[in-house]
Image (spheres, coloured by chain):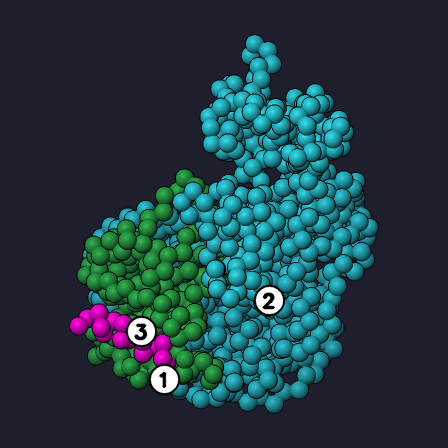
Chain colours: A cyan, B green
Amino acid sequence: MTSKISVNKPDSYALLNGDEAVARGAVEANIKVAAAYPGTPSTEILETLAEATKDLGIYAEWSINEIVAAEVAIGASMTGVRALTSMKHVGLNVASDAIMTLAYTGIEGGLVIVVCDDPALHSSQNEQDTRYFAVHAKLPLLDAGNPQEALDMARRAYEISEKLRLPIILRLTTRVAHGKARVKLGEFQKLARKAEFDKNIPRWVMVPANASRQHRVLESRLLEAKYEAETSQFNIIEDNNTKIGIIGSGVGYYYARSLVDTTKVSWLKLGFVHPFPSEMVKTFAKKVKKLIVLEELRPYIEENLARLKIDFIGKTELGLEEIGEFTPDKIRTALSKLHLTTTPESPQQLNLTPRPPGLCPGCTHRALYYALNMLHKSVHCETTKCVGCGTCEYACSHNKEKVHNPAKSRIRVVRQNQIQNIAISCQICQNPACIIACPKEALSQSPLTGIIIVDKKQCNGCGWCIEACPYGAINMHPTTRKPMVCDVCGGNPRCVKLCPEGALSLRGKSNDKIVAGDIGCYSLGALPPIKALQTCLCMGGGISQAAGMIHAGTKDKVFAVIGDSTFFHGGMPGLLNIAYNKANVCVIVMDNSIVAMTGHQPTPGSGKTAMGQDAKIINIEAIVRALGIEKVFTVDPYDLKTTMQTLKKATNHEGPSVVIAKRPCPLLTPHGTPRKIKDNCKGCRVCTEAFGCPAISQNGNKVKIDTALCNGCGVCDKVCPFNAIGEIDRETQT
Amino acid sequence: MKPKLDIVFSGVGGQGVVVLSDIFCEAAMIEDFNVAKAEIHGMAQRGGSIVAYARIGTKVEAPLIETGKADAIVGFEVLETTRALPMLKENGTVIVNMKLIPPNGLTANVKLKNTEELLELLRTKALVHQVDGPGIAQKLGNTLVVNTILLGALSALPEIPLKAESFQQAIANRLKEKYINLNLKAFQLGRESVQNNQR
C-alpha cells in the first residue's frame, strides 16, 4: 500500500490532519531528511513521512530526543538539501540550545522546524506559546489555522527559508494538528540537489568573534523577514467595508468565521506572525472603528498592537483567558458581548461518572506499581489525630467477619495515656518475633508483602505469638481460638477508608517512600486508584529530582520511575549523575521497548527504525552498568513475587540502584486466556481498588471481569488474596 | 448548496471512534462535500473517553461543533453516548451501541447510572436508535466490526444525505482487502437494524 501522501496528484483532495498535511507539504517541497522525537500532537508528521520514505527516497528517523533530531536536520540542511524536524512545544525546549544558535549560522538547504502547541493540555505538561519562542530566537514563524494552511505553509516555508537563509518555525496547535479536513494537494517539486558541505568556517564555527558577526547577519535577515511577513500570502485582509474588524490567528479565527455573518465584519487572518507585519496591521486598523483580536494562549498580537499604539478589544474585554484552548462556545460568548453573535444557551448538566484515562488492561506498569505500592505496607496510625473512637475495629470486624464486634478486629485501639490513643495492627516486621516464637511453625511471612500468614491447621492456639509481638498487634479470635493478624486487606484496608479522623494511612515500614515520576503512559500511575508516584515534571527529570531530595536530607526511601524511551531521551545524564555523585535513589526503568503513549513508535530498544528497517537492539542494562551503576536487576513485572523481592533488595542497598522491569507493551503482544471471578470471591475489592484493572468492575457485593476487555495477563490471579480469580474455560467461554 | 451536518462520535479509547469518523468523512468527500473534523489522540490508548467531531457541508470553516448544535450522536458505549448529549440539538438523533463499560478506578461508594437510566436521559432530548452491536457482531463471528455496524446504522438515518454506495466505497478504500467483505456485511446489518426500527 502506498502512503497517503506519496502520490503526486496535484489539485486532488485528501482527508488529512494537520500533521499529515505538513508531511505532504514537505514532500511537495522535495525534502531529503526528516528527524523527530514522538510527542503528541506532533507525532504523525514524522510517522507519515516515514511511511512515504519507500516511495520517495526520503530519509526519516526517530531520534532519541528533540535536540538530536534538530541537529540531524540541521546537518542535512548544511549540505544544501531540504530538511524537516518536528516536535511538540515542550520538545522545543529540549531542542532550543541548537536552535538559538542556528538562528546565527542560518541554513543552506531549506529547513522547517515544525512545533505543535497544545492549548488545553490534552496531552502535555504545560501550555507554552511557541510564538514567543520565535521572538526569543529571532526566527520567522508561520502559524497554521487549519490543515490546508498547514500544507500550504509547509511547502512555502521552504522557499521563504532559502530566500532568507533562516530556518522557519511552523506552528500548529492540537486542533490543527489533530483536526482533519478535505485538503487540496499541490504538485511535487523536483530539485536535483546533491549533498555538498561548504567548509565556511566563519559561518559554521560559532566561536565568539564569528558568532558576534553572525548576530549582525541575523538582524539584517530579520529585516528581510519582516518584508516577507508584510507581503505574505498567509496574511489576508478581507475588507467588507464595515466598522468592525476582526484580527486573528490560528483556529480561533475560523471559529469566529463560522459563528459570525462573515460579510458584517472585515477580517485579517495572520499566518506569518513573526516578524509582526505591523504596516499591514496598521492599514487594516485604520479602516475599521473597532478592532477585535482573537488569539489563543498569550496576547502576542495584542502586545504588538499596544506597541504600535493601536486601540483594540482583546482578551480582557472579551472575557477570554490565556489559559486553555478556544472553543466555538467560548468565542460565541465573547462575541455576544459586542452583539456580533447571539448569546449561547447554558449547556445541559448531566453529572455523569467521569471516565479518566488510565493504564490499559494488562499494562506492565500496573503490575510494577502494585509491587511497589505493596512494598512493606502496614496500617499506620497518627497518635495526634486518633481519638480512640474504635471505628476501625468495627470496620475491620465487619469487613473480615461480617459482624460489628471489636473482639473480632485485627486492629485494636489502645489508650496510651490520658490524652493519647493509638490504633495498633501488624507492623510487618523484618524477622518477625511472632514467627520465631511459634512452637508449631504455624506462622510464616509472605515474601511478597511481608504479611504474617497463619496456618490454621498447624496452630494449636497457644497464644505465644501474641506474647511475642512487640507491638501487641496480634489478638486471639474469641470463638476459633486462633490468632488474628492484619493483612492490610490486600492493600485496600477498610479501616483506613472509614477512619473519621483521617488518622490511619497505609504506609511503608518505617517511613513512607517517595516515588519521582516522569513522562509517558506510566505518569497515569499517579491517578487513583494506583496513586504510586508523586512527581512528573519533564523528560528525564524524575531521577534528578529524586537525587535532589536525597541531598536535601530526606529520610524517606526515594524511587524514580522512568520509561525506556524517556530513559534514552533524557534519563541517561541523570543516572550518570547519581552514579558519580552517589545519590541513594532506586531507579526503576519500566522497559516496554516502545514509545507507547504516542502510538507505538520504535525506541533504540525495539529493533526497528522509523523506516521499518532492522536495527541492533540497544541493551539498557549494559548502558546502566556503563554509566557506573553497580546494583542492577532485571525483572519481569508480571512476576510479582520476584519483582517485590528485587525491589526490597534494591531498597536495602545503600547507594544508587536500578531495577529494569522489562516486558513488551501488552497492546503489541498476543493476549493470554481471559480471567473470570470464581465463586469464592469475598468482594474485598483488592483487584479493583488496590490493583485497579479496568477490566474488573464491581458487580453487586462482588466483582466481575469483562472478558472482552481482559487481556489475560493473569497478574490479578496473584493479587487476589483469596485465590478467587482464574482462567475462563476456552471451550465454553465461561 | 449541500446540507450542513454535524455529527459527534463518542466512545471509549480502543473502540474505533476515530477510524469510524474518518470513514464517514471520506464517504462525504466522495459526494463532493467539504469536511472538517476534530479528534484527540494520545493519553488514552485504551479506556478513556474519546470524542470525534465530523462536520460536512458546502463550506466548513472550523472543526469543533458548538454545544447543543450537533445533528446526531453516534455512541459506541452507553455512558459515553450520554456524556455527549449536551452537544446534541433539541430533538436530534442518537444511535447508541448497547454496551456499558464501567469507567476506570471506580470505588465502591460511586453510584453508577445503569443502562436504562442512561437511555431515559437520552430520550429526554433525542430520538434514540438502540443498536445491538455486540449481538450483531457475534453473529458475524468478529467482535471488532461493531463500529462498522454503527456506521451502517448512521447511514440509514433520514437526515444523512449520503448514498449507501459512498459509505461502501469509503469502507473498501480504507480497509485491508481481507476485511472488506466482512465489514460490508456488518454495514448492511447495521443499516437494516435502523431501517427496521423506523418501520
**Neighbourhood count class around disc 2 (C-alpha, 10 Å): few under 14, some 14–19, many 20 upward:** few
Magenta stretch, main secondary structure, is helix
Inspect the image, locate mark 1, and give the three-letter code of the amino acid beneath it. Gln
The residue pinned by badge 2 equals A669
Q: CA distance from mark 2 to mark 3?
A: 31 Å
Q: A637 or A111, which lies in front?
A: A637
Question: Do discs 2 and 3 share a chain?
Answer: no
Left or right, residue B179 beside residue A553: left
Question: Do discs 2 and 1 share a chain?
Answer: no
Q: Position of residue A171 (x, y in %)?
A: 48, 66
Q: Position of residue A37 (x, y in %)?
A: 60, 66
The residue pinned by badge 3 equals B190
Q: Nearer the viewer, mark 1 or mark 3?
A: 3
Inspect the image, locate mark 2, and give the three-letter code of the amino acid beneath it. Thr
Q: Chain of mark 2?
A: A
Q: Earlier in the sequence, mark 1 or mark 3?
A: 1
Q: Residue at x 36, y 60 (%)?
A: B99
Left or right, residue A488 beside residue A441: left
Secondary element under disc 2, as helix, strand or loop, is loop
Left or right, residue B108 beside residue A563: left
Query: Magenta part of the protein: which range?
Result: B184-199
Q: B5 or A381, which lies in front?
A: A381
Q: Which mark is residue B169?
A: 1
**Contact, mark 2 vs mark 1 (Cβ under 8 Å):** no
The answer to whether residue A97 of the structure is visible from this angle is no
Up the image or down, B93 lies above or below A479; here it is below
Q: CA distance from mark 2 to mark 1?
A: 32 Å
Residue B191 is inside the magenta segment? yes
**Contact, mark 2 vs mark 3 (Cβ under 8 Å):** no
